[in-house]
Structure formats: structure tokens, C-alpha cells
Image (spheres, helix red, strand yellow):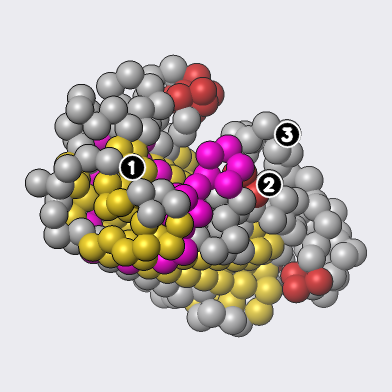
Amino acid sequence: MTVPDRPGEQQGALGELTEAAAVPTVVDEQGYAPGESTLTPVADGATPVTVSTSGELDDALAQARPGTTIVLADGVYTSTHPFTITTACTAAEPCTLRGGAAAVVEGGGPDGHYALHLDGADHWALTGFSVRAASKGVMLDDTAHTVLDGLDVSQIGAEAIHLRSSSSDNVVRGCSVHDTGLVAPQYGEGIYVGSAVSNWDRYSGGAPDASDRNELIGNHVWATGAENIDIKEGTTGGVLRDNVFDGTGMSGLNGADSWVDVKGNAWTIAGNDGTHALRDGFQTHVAAPGWGERNVFTGNRAQVDATGYGFRIQDASSTGNVVRCDNVVTGAEAGTSNQACS
């Protein structure tokens, strides 16, 4: 069962669909549009399963086992509930869900529900298709060694991609993430890793949400209501590399005024390229004692064009964060950083 993690979020209810997310509004008792097949495909772990309707996708995900490959035919897949993956695959027998850009998985509109929810879904690869018109696009809970590759995620009510509840060792690469925060701009992050300390009781038994060693590589993130990237306290050892950010249209609500917020520890932030910041390019924050420390910023290019810094480091003298001298900052009225480079 999906648990809301934003105030007032209701999961499982079908929201109003946007014009761009046009789908039949009459559904049967299973949540499928009239005429959709609910035939059960056989996922034998060797032969790829091609699906072309929402019912077939639901069935294929429910039957998946290690080694399964599911291929999405072009078309729109939507339901009254999130499409959910709970099968844990293995390194020896990984699983795949793939499709082209014209294969679109939806979530009932920006005020609807999650489009895709991976819960304990280790060793999956989600590749190439589009995700849109959902409260959240792709949610990972308790999921490890999974790859999101080349997805286009847009028209999202809150954040687009969220790695939560000790989801570790995952890779998000080559994804296009845009048009988020359409219902709640302050919660419209592009890619969000971990949970805020205020939600640790809910998602990690009161301990830090150790969504660790995740890699966000080569993504393009723009038109987000909140930060392009939000790395929460409790996360450790991740990599944010070779991404392209654009802060145009960011709301500024809840302090969302930089492309990247880093509140975790020992992250490497390297080779990223940002334009049009609202205030600062990159920020660190000490949101909980012992966090927001020992992060390294190197080889980034920041065209800030705003009043702040390229790199704003909270408690710069005591947190052990490093801003390398190879970062290039232009258009930052306050300067390159509030911390000397090294």
C-alpha cells in the first residue's frame, strides 16, 4: 500500500486528468478502460513478454520473476492505481521493463497517484519509455541495484523520481525530467534521494533513511517547481555527475532556490552544468546534526545569473565539505563560493 510522504497527499484516488493526458474516463471495476484486454501473459523468465494494454502490464508485473523482460508496445498505460513492481530479481537474473518514448505510463493526472512504484524491486532495469501525468512519476522504496535509464518523466504533481526507504546502489542515468510541481511547486523536485528527518519515523523506523551509494548520471533536469536535485540528510556516498540543470521557473517555496541541495554526507558532485539559478547554484545544508558533511564539488560549471553564490556551504568551517578550484562559476553576484576553494 502506498503511503503518502507529503502533507495532504492522497494516493490511490483518481485525480483530474490534464488535456495532454487524455485517456478514457470510464473504467471497469479493475480500473481498465473499456476494450482493454486483461489476458495474463506468461512471464517465463526467458521469452520477452510484450504488453499493449494496462491490464496486460499489471498482469505481467504481478507475474514477473527473476529473468523476466517486459516490453511496452507504443501507447498509453493508465489505471486507478500505481503500476507496482514487487519482485526482487537477482544479479544473475535481472529483470527489465522497456519501451520506446511513445510508450507512456501514466498516474491518473498530476493530482492522481504514483505512475510506477517499485517496492523491494531489486535488480530491475527500466529503460526508454515515458512517465507522465502522475502525483509522482517513479517511486523506489526498499529497492537496490536497479537502473532507470533514458526515461522521460514529466507532467508531475510533486517530484518526478524519488529513491526512498533505504533504496541503495541504484543508478538514474540519461533521463529527461521536467514539468514537475504542477500541484505542489514546493514539493516539485526533479530527482529526490532519501527522506527528510521529519519522515524518518515513517520510512526508516526513526533511523536515518540510508538510501546510500546511488548514482545520478547524465540526466537533464529543468522546469521543476523545487530543486532540480534534492539529496536528503541520512544518505551517504552517492554520485551526482555529468548532469545538466536549468533553474528557470523554480518556485522558491520552502527555500527551493538552487539547482542542487546536498544534505547528505560524502557525496561526489562532479562535472555538472547548470544555468539560470534562482539564487545559488549548489547548496549544502545541515538539516540534522552530523549531516551535510564531507561532500566534494569538483569540475562543475555554474552559470548562475543570480544574486547568490555558485556554491553556498552551510557551516563551512566545521562540515568538511570541499569546493575544488576547478569549478567554473559565472554570473554569481555574491561570488564563486562562501568557502575558499582547495
Q: Earlier in the sequence, mark 1 or mark 3?
A: 3
| Amino acid type for the residue under numbered disc 1 | Arg
Report the magenta residues as a range. 252-279
Examine the structure image and report whether residue 260 is included in the region drawn in magenta: yes
Q: Position of residue 175 (x, y in %)?
A: 43, 68
Q: Earlier in the sequence, mark 2 or mark 1?
A: 2
Q: Which disc number belongs to residue 8?
A: 3
Check the image and name the residue furthest to the left.
342
From the viewer's perspective, is the residue at label 1 or at label 3 nearer?
1
| Amino acid type for the residue under numbered disc 2 | Ala
The reply to whether residue 238 is visible in this rendering is no
Examine the structure image and report whether residue 32 is included in the region drawn in magenta: no
Q: Position of residue 249 (x, y in %)?
A: 59, 61
Q: Secondary structure at mark 1?
A: strand
Q: Residues within 10 Å of mark 3 (few under 14, many from 20)?
A: few
Residue at the disc numbered 1? 312
